[in-house]
Amino acid sequence: MALNEITITQAIIERYTRKLLACTEVDAAIVGAGPAGLVAACYLAKAGKKVAVFERKLSIGGGMWGGGMMFNEIVVQKEGKDILDGFGVRTQLYKRGYYTADAIEAVSTICSVAVKAGARIFNCISVEDVMIREGRVIGLVINWSPVEMAGLHVDPLTITAKYVIDSTGHNTEVLRVIERKADVKLNTPSGGIMGERSMWAEKAERLTLDNTKEICPGVYVAGMSANAAFGGPRMGPIFGGMLLSGQKAAEAIIAAALVPAATTWKKKKK
C-alpha cells in the first residue's frame, strides 16, 4: 500500500485533537508525570475516574529514569516493592529491606499500565496558571512547553478538574503559581511553600508519605512536591516513598469525591 503524507498528518491531528478535547473536563488533573504522578494516575483511572496527566518535558518518568547519577537502577523498600509488584515490575533483593529494579522497566511499565487503565498523558505541556472559582482550584491553564521556553506571547487554553495533583517534583510548580497569584494560605505550618531541605533518605521517605495531602481546596501534593511544600528533605534515588505517595494521593481523592468539597480558603495575613 502506498503511503500518503497528508493522510499521516491528518491522522495525527485528528486523533490528538479528539484526545485533548475529551480531557478538557476531568475528574483529576495531574501535573508532572514522575513516579508519584504516574502511580496516582493509574489508581485513579482504575477507580473509574477520568484522569489527564500534563508533563512539561518530552519524556515522562521524572527523576526515576536516571536512577542515581545516571546509573539506571532504583532502590525501594518492602512497601515500595509491593507497589512495583502490583504493576508487574521485576525487583531483586539486594540486602534485607532493600530491593532494586531497573529504572527503565519501572517507568515504562508503570506508564503503560496507567495508560491502559484509562489515564491520558500529554507531554510537552506546561501549566502556567490555575482557575479559581468560589475559593477552590477548579482547573488548569495550559500551554505548549516550547512556547514557555521561547518566551513567546501566545495565549493559553484551559481545562477544568474536580481535583488537581501537584507532582511536579522539587519545584512545586503548581503551588508556586497559587502562592504567587491566589493570596491563599497553604496548609503548611508557614502558610506558604517551605522549601526542600538537604538529603536524608530515611526521614524523607517517611515525610513524603506524611506530607501527601490536600494543601488547599482542590489541590493535593504528591512525591517530592509534598516534601518541598512542607519543608522535608530530599531522599535521592530510593523511590518507595514516591510510589506510595502517588497511591495515597489517589486514595485521598477517591475518598474526598464521596463527600462535599470544602471551599473555604484561609487568606494570607497582610
Image: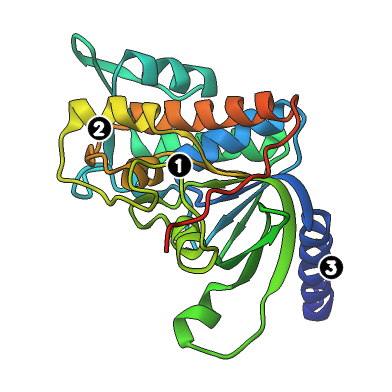
For disc 1, the marked residue is: 187
Which amino acid type corresponds to the residue marked 1 in the rendered image? Answer: Asn
User: From the viewer's perspective, is residue 138 above or below residue 112?
Assistant: below
**Which secondary structure, mark 3?**
helix
Instruction: Estimate the spatial distance between the alpha carbons at disc 1 and disc 3, rounded to whole Å.
Output: 42 Å
> Is 221 rendered above or below residue 132?
above
Please, what secondary structure does the residue beneath circle 1 have? loop
Disc 3/disc 2 C-alpha distance (Å): 44 Å
Front one among 93 and 225: 225
Q: How is the image coloured?
A: rainbow
Q: Is residue 224 visible?
A: yes
Q: Earlier in the sequence, mark 1 or mark 2?
A: 1
Decide which of tag 3 and tag 2 comes sooner along the chain. 3
In this rendering, position of residue 221 left or right of residue 14: left
Crowd rating for badge 1 (residues with CA inside 10 Å; few <14, some 14–19, many 20+): some
Residue occupying the point 82% across, 61% down: 21
Residue 14 got which mark?
Answer: 3
